[in-house]
Image (cartoon, grey):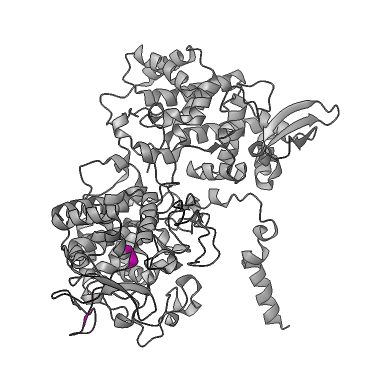
């Protein structure tokens, strides 16, 4: 072997994690990477970069004009269909936002993740790398003042406007990420577009075909459903079942689903006018000299009329760059039959094209083509419910326009959280129920003197530190940074569905809130129950710290308000119910996923680092904030209710030997190495802080002499972070 070969081989071994990474050798190891992937140091704009501040300097009118001008600036390297990029940008925005799923709030266009693998190379995102390259001159002009995340979504919104549709509005405010969110679970398959129903249980035949949680798309690499039909079979009724389940996972009801399908497919065309095997590699695996330019098409020019994307070929309407009612006109005016595209894909075309419905070719002057529908389009008239809605929209195009505008707005903004996070002059005045609205704060905020009085009243209420901290945690820890839902603001913990959640019932949350309501009613202070719940948590931490000999003050920022049941979307809030919460040592039922992995995911949702997660678990165990008074697992201290580092001291003590209780490895008992006497009981999420090398390194620092101060400092900062995750008035 030559010296050059040896050098290349050694270098490759150092930089190729699939060969040398820890996951290769220990695939079941707890992976903490997700807690580091949004590290501020990864931002090329600097750790202190504030996108909201940068955006405030943006010339929104200038940006709008430049994006509008781009729509009709057809480029030779990627010619626009009918001379207009509008449909192309609609697809880009739709596919950026459309990955959202309400089960865990992941996906969506809120981070610009479409720039990175796997999304940038999903088969369903074919050729969208060209759309992003078309936008580069605009991004280059405005720099840090406009994020890619905003631009990718804004372009589609403007595309609709330039083709005659009046949108509902637009909110900026999506800050970019700078690395792939490769810990997102997109499905169990190991092959793109695998046809094996691995992500389903049940079948069409038994009427019980269910998509596994938290997934939304029907196949690996698709945004929604297979346009040819389930597993490529052109069965419109079965396709309707897939469409309904998939769109419901993305928080859309039947009317919104039809409106989006009809409205979106009013524009543009599908591309499959070339052999399927002419398409090259996706961007992520393209040759290095192609600079991330993927899906090179070797057939003829590979551009314009020879473009291949989905494999289906044709436009839905005879007016593909105009807003009108032609999609439904076309759908209802014809009898349809299954044909094959030039790429071999199953699609639907009229048995006989009616007068006025021939489609002008997108690139060849004088040529006309028949209109084309996918199997998913045919579902709009095959399914009885979809058919009824489609007929209504056909007869009342003004209803279609309104409902498409609202559904499109929801699609683009569903992962942004409350409208308080929206920026820019195009945000509509109307606040919608899916934005989890809370009332505006009225009157002056409570001052320091009033806060001190309220804190004393809470301390005198007889509630323990564990009750106060546990209830505040129960309220605030519903937050998830994936779509900015949940949190303490609104005090929805006292409303349906949260009031009936198992963990809250088991923890006795309602009785604690009842005591806090009495404090509120007895006070003249202008304070909400939401604020009192959080303030109670602060009091509980201070009580526990004082009991351990530490005099601390937990920062508190008033300003929360109380939501009502009418302002709460019960069905979708149900997805926020914690099935497991390691911070309270709670698991509702076995899920097949080890509890420590669920803990890391919960920590990610709360925007915590590994040291913060560690400090919170140890501190809450010491305080005694487990779910349920009878649950003492992991409370590795002889003085519960005291904020100490005892959890870590006793966990890493070599005087204790741990062994599983029963056949499973969920519960463990720790026995004195010398006497054999049982000292403690603990769960997997307790012991992982001693078994995982990264977490043990942190635990040992907290357990060392003087480590209690570091732990308490980190605990307080992390606790406040969780309490304020949804305070978008304080941070963005």
Viewer-side residue, 211 vs 636: 211
Quick check: can you spot residue 648? Answer: yes
Q: Which residues are magenta?
A: 361-376
Which image quadrant for residue 573? top left
Q: Is residue 523 above or below residue 178?
A: above
Q: Is 364 covered by the magenta stretch?
A: yes
Residue located at (23% from left, 47% from top) = 427
Residue located at (49% from left, 28% from top) = 504
How many numbered marks does the figure carry?
Answer: 0
Which image quadrant for residue 237? bottom left
Q: Position of residue 515 (x, y in %)?
A: 44, 15
Viewer-side residue, 519 vs 301: 301
Q: Is residue 241 left or right of residue 477?
A: left
Quick check: can you spot residue 705? Answer: no
**Quadrant assignment for the C terminus:** top left
Q: Is residue 617 left or right of residue 528?
A: right
Q: Position of residue 216 (x, y in %)?
A: 43, 54
Q: Position of residue 160 (x, y in %)?
A: 21, 61
Q: Is residue 426 above or below residue 335?
A: above
**Quadrant assignment for the N terminus:** bottom right
Q: Is 102 covered by the magenta stretch?
A: no
Q: Is residue 363 left or right of residue 579?
A: left
Q: Residue furthest right?
A: 674
What secondary structure is the stretch in magenta mostly built from? loop
């Amino acid at each position: 072997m030559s010296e050059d070969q040896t050098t290349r081989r050694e270098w490759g071994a150092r930089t190729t994690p699939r060969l040398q990474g820890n996951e290769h050798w220990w695939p079941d190891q707890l992976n903490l990477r997700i807690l580091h992937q949004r590290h501020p140091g990864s931002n090329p704009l600097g750790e202190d970069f504030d996108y909201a501040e940068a955006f405030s300097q943006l010339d929104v009118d200038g940006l709008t004009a430049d994006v509008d001008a781009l729509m009709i600036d057809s480029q030779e390297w990627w010619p626009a269909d009918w001379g207009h990029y509008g449909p192309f940008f609609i697809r880009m925005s739709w596919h950026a936002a459309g990955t959202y799923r309400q089960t865990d709030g992941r996906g969506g266009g809120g981070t610009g993740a479409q720039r990175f693998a796997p999304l940038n190379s999903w088969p369903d995102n074919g050729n969208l790398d060209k759309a992003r390259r078309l936008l580069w001159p605009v991004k280059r002009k405005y720099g840090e003042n406009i994020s890619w995340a905003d631009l990718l979504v804004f372009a589609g919104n403007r595309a609709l406007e330039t083709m005659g549709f009046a949108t509902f509005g637009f909110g900026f405010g999506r800050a970019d990420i700078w690395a792939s969110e490769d810990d997102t679970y997109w499905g169990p398959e190991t092959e793109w577009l695998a046809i094996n129903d691995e992500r389903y249980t049940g079948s069409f035949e038994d009427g019980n075909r269910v998509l596994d949680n938290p997934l939304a798309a029907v196949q690996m690499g698709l945004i929604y459903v297979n346009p040819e039909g389930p597993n490529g079979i052109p069965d419109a009724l079965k396709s309707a079942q897939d469409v309904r389940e998939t769109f419901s996972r993305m928080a859309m009801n039947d009317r919104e689903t039809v409106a989006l399908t009809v409205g979106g497919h009013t524009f543009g065309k599908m591309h499959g006018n070339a052999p399927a095997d002419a398409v090259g590699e996706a961007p992520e695996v393209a040759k290095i000299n192609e600079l991330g330019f993927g899906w090179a098409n070797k057939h003829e020019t590979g551009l314009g009329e020879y473009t291949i994307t989905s494999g289906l070929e044709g436009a839905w309407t005879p007016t593909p760059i105009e807003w009108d009612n032609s999609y439904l006109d076309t759908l209802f005016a014809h009898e349809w039959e299954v044909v094959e595209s030039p790429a071999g894909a199953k699609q639907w075309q009229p048995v006989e094209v009616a007068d006025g419905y021939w489609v002008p070719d997108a690139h060849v002057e004088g040529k006309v083509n028949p209109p084309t529908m996918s199997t998913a389009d045919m579902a709009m008239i095959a399914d009885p419910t979809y058919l009824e809605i489609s007929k209504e929209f056909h007869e009342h195009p003004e209803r279609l326009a309104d409902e498409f505008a609202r559904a499109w707005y929801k699609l683009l903004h569903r992962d942004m959280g409350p409208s308080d996070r929206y920026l820019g002059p195009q945000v509509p005045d109307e606040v919608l129920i899916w934005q989890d609205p809370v009332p505006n704060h009225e009157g002056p905020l409570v001052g320091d003197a009033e806060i001190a009085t309220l804190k004393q009243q809470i301390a005198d209420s007889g509630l323990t530190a564990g009750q106060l901290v546990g209830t505040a945690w129960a309220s605030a820890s519903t937050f998830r940074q994936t779509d900015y839902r949940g949190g303490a603001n609104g005090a929805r913990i006292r409303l349906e569905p949260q009031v009936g959640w198992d963990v809250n019932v088991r923890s006795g949350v309602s009785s604690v809130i009842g005591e806090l309501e009495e404090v509120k009613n007895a006070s003249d202070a202008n304070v909400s129950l939401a604020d009192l719940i959080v303030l109670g948590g602060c009091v509980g931490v201070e009580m526990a710290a004082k009991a351990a000999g530490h005099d601390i003050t937990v920062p508190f920022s008033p300003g929360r308000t109380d939501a009502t049941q009418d302002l709460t979307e019960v069905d979708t809030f149900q997805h926020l119910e914690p099935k497991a919460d390691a911070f309270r040592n709670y698991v509702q039922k076995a899920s097949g996923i080890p509890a420590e992995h669920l803990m890391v995911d919960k920590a990610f949702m709360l925007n915590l680092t590994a040291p913060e997660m560690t400090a919170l678990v140890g501190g809450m165990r010491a305080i005694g904030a487990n779910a349920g008074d009878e649950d003492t697992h992991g409370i590795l201290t002889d003085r519960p209710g005291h904020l100490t580092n005892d959890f870590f001291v006793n966990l890493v003590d070599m005087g204790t030997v741990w062994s599983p209780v029963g056949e499973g490895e969920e519960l463990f008992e720790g026995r004195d190495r010398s006497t054999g006497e049982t000292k403690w009981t603990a769960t997997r999420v307790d012991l992982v802080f001693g078994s995982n090398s990264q977490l043990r390194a942190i635990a040992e620092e907290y357990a060392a002499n003087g480590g209690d101060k570091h732990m308490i400092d980190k605990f307080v900062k992390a606790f406040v972070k969780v309490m304020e995750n949804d305070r978008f008035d304080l941070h963005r």
